[in-house]
Amino acid sequence: MKFVYAFQKVLDVKTNEKKQAESQLSQAIGALTLAERELSDLMLSKYRYQEKLSDDATKGRPMAEMIAGQQYVDHLDERIRAAKRKLVAAEKQVNDLRERLADRSVDEKVWLNAKDRALTVHRAEVERRSQYEMDEMATLRSRFAR
């Protein structure tokens, strides 16, 4: 007798939800990595440009160039602040999606456990029926053997 789980479609939905949550988390981690790299690159650019400005100041560059250079550093500071906000948002999204994945994993596990319990009950029922049939055949043989 074949086992057919009555709630297989529910289990399939829960499994798909978990896979979708895993995929979303993977994408969010990619976005977080990208945001970290962008922030790092901006901070490195700022550091290098400040070093260049410092060297230019000692070399006696014109004040207009120095002011333009400082404006560029200010622009980099604004981009760094924006990159930090983006990084915080990406971290929050990753944390939210990790929690969501944990919830989906628990849901799937609950339904998998329910399926396992149903399968165990099914196997016990099949075994009970099989034993009953064997007992029936033994009883019939003993009646006809007399």
Image: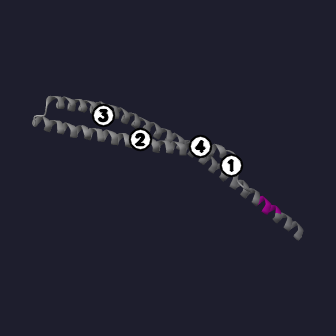
Sequence-first disc among 2 and 4:
4
What amino acid type is highlighted by mark number 1? Tyr
Is residue 25 covered in magenta? no
Residue tagged by mark 4? 14
**Residue name at image x 52 percent, y 40 percent:** 103
Magenta stretch bounds = 131-136
Circle 3 is placed at which residue position? 80
Q: In terms of secondary structure, where does tag 2 sit?
A: helix
Q: Element type at marker 3?
A: helix
Quadrant in the picture for residue 44: top left
How many labels, in total? 4
Pick the residue in front: 114 or 137. Answer: 114
Callout 4 amino acid: Lys
Secondary structure at numbered mark 4: helix
Q: Are marks 1 and 4 in contact (CB under 8 Å)?
A: no
The chosen color scheme is one colour
| Left or right: 38 in relation to 102 | left
Q: Which mark is residue 5?
A: 1
Q: Nearer the viewer, mark 1 or mark 4?
A: 4
C-alpha distance separating marks 1 and 3: 55 Å
Q: Is residue 133 magenta?
A: yes
The numbered mark at residue 31 is 2
C-beta proximity under 8 Å, tags 3 and 4: no
Q: Tell me the kind of residue under disc 2.
A: Ala
Q: How many residues crowd mark 4 within 10 Å: few (<14), some (14–19), many (20+)?
A: many
Q: CA distance from mark 2 to mark 1?
A: 39 Å
CA gap between label 2 and label 4 equals 26 Å
